[in-house]
Amino acid sequence: MGFDSFLDFNCNKIRRTIVPPMSPTCPIEGRKYTMYSSNITGEYFITVSNRFCKDAGCQLIRNDVFAEWALNDCGALVLYVYIDLGDENSLLAFSKYIMFKRLIPNYLRTILHGDREFFRQNKCLLNRQIRVHFMSECTKFNTIENYGTLRNYR
């Protein structure tokens, strides 16, 4: 399976886990997402919890994407997405940056479809801004970018 096949998103290949105290419909406050995809099956895995799940799986072969609902400096609710590009090696950071830029729409669709009961109950969140923070030791790629709203990723 080539890299381009991962750009073809299939919402039937989402595997979701919800960890209490989160439920399929609430709460908004403290709701966090941990996501990764399988290079073999093309599946996307999402865990909905009140904390990020950084200890699951082998970190050497996984590139986790984290997201959370939080208030910005103006008090507006925003979906913040965190992607660790790591490495001071600018070539490696650039490669990861390009890869994740291509996959971000799929990760946003994973949130939207994987937590669909939550969004049916909280439709106003579909219009909230998305901020993606690419975190890197290489300052050139340590950026925060606007990705519109979840409504754009149906």
Image: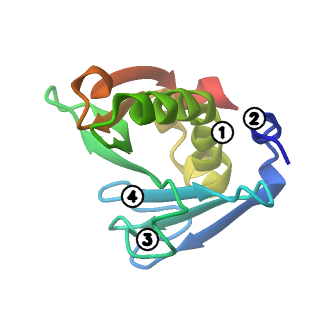
- Foreground pick, 14 / 20: 14
Residue 36 horizontal/vertical position (percent): 57, 57
Q: Are marks 3 and 1 in contact (CB under 8 Å)?
A: no
Q: Amino acid at mark 4?
A: Lys
Residue 120 horizontal/vertical position (percent): 62, 48
Marks 4 and 3: which is nearer the front? Answer: 4
Marks 4 and 2: which is nearer the front? Answer: 2
Residue 126 horizontal/vertical position (percent): 53, 33
Of mark 3 and mark 2, the one earlier in the sequence is 2
Of mark 4 and mark 2, the one earlier in the sequence is 2
Q: Are marks 1 and 2 in contact (CB under 8 Å)?
A: yes
Q: Secondary structure at mark 1?
A: helix
- Please rate how many residues cluster around mark 2, counting C-alpha atoms within 10 Å: few if below 14, some from 14 to 19, many from 20: some
Task: Tell me, for residue 22, which label it has, or none.
Answer: 3
Extreme-left residue of the structure:
73
- The residue lying at 22 percent from left, 25 percent from top is 139
- Residue that badge 4 annotates: 32
- Residue that badge 1 annotates: 106
Q: Is residue 105 above or below residue 41?
A: above
- The residue lying at 40 percent from left, 20 percent from top is 146
Decide if residue 113 is on the left or right side of residue 126.
right
- Residue that badge 2 annotates: 7
